[in-house]
Amino acid sequence: MAHAHHYRLRTRWTGAAEGPTTTYAAYSRAYVVEIDGKPALAGSADPIFRGDPALHNPEEWLVAALSACHMLSYLALCARGGIRVLAYEDEATGTMQFQDGRIRFTEVTLHPRVSIDATSDPVKADLLHERAHEECFIANSVNFPVRHEASVTVAISSTEASTI
């Protein structure tokens, strides 16, 4: 039988300190997410929804969650599969648009750039991205496509590299 994983946090509207919701244009969208034992995360709505552009928004957090989940799944597979990852970086993008009468995410694309050492198999390292995608819990939980356009670079020496 599978184990359930539960997560608990508090989301608190901090914008109330600036006044109540008297009109759509007038209230603050600021909030804080608190998770016991961790630093609080300050957020707001996306600026297009009258949020504070200096704060992170839920849309960014969703894209970040997908990116981090893929990375962590990939690193675990590499560690188990004998691929020595030296560096990993992703420039993820997400698209939200009006579709089927609602504003929704229509896709997220991950762009992982991975560097492996010269003793690792670059073909296997590249193929593990597909398996990481299949194993990512967050990607398995959303109703829009999550794509990945990965590249793997083999470190030949400290000054040279080869890209797959």
Image (cartoon, rainbow, N blue to C red):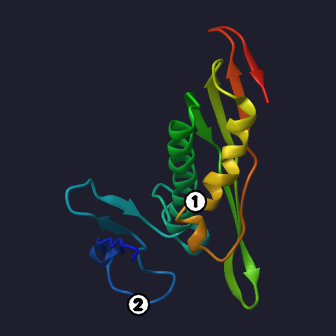
State the residue in front, 122 or 10: 122
The answer to whether the residues at label 2 and label 1 have Cβ atoms under 8 Å apart is no
* Classed neighbour count for the residue bearing mark 2: other residues with Cα under 10 Å, few (<14), some (14–19), many (≥20): few
Q: Quadrant of the C terminus?
A: top right
Determine whether 126 is above or below 53 in the image: above
Determine whether 105 is above or below 77 in the image: below
Q: Nearer the viewer, mark 2 or mark 1?
A: 1
* Residue at x 50%, y 86% (from the top left corner): 24
Residue at the disc numbered 2: 22
* Classed neighbour count for the residue bearing mark 1: other residues with Cα under 10 Å, few (<14), some (14–19), many (≥20): some
Q: Amino acid at mark 2?
A: Thr
Q: Quadrant of residue 99?
A: bottom right
Residue at the disc numbered 1: 135
Q: Which mark is residue 3?
A: none
Residue farthest along the right direction in this orientation: 164
Residue farthest along the left direction in this orientation: 37
Determine whether 19 is above or below 8 in the image: below
State the residue in front, 74 or 18: 74
Q: Secondary structure at mark 1?
A: helix
Answer with mark 2 or mark 1, whichever residue precedes in sequence.
2
State the residue in front, 1 or 39: 1
Q: Quadrant of residue 78?
A: top right
Q: Position of residue 70 (x, y in %)?
A: 58, 52
Q: Secondary structure at mark 2?
A: loop
State the residue in front, 21 or 149: 149
* Residue at x 36%, y 73% (from the top left corner): 3
Q: Position of residue 148 (x, y in %)?
A: 72, 52
Q: Position of residue 46 (x, y in %)?
A: 55, 67
Q: Is residue 137 left or right of residue 3?
A: right
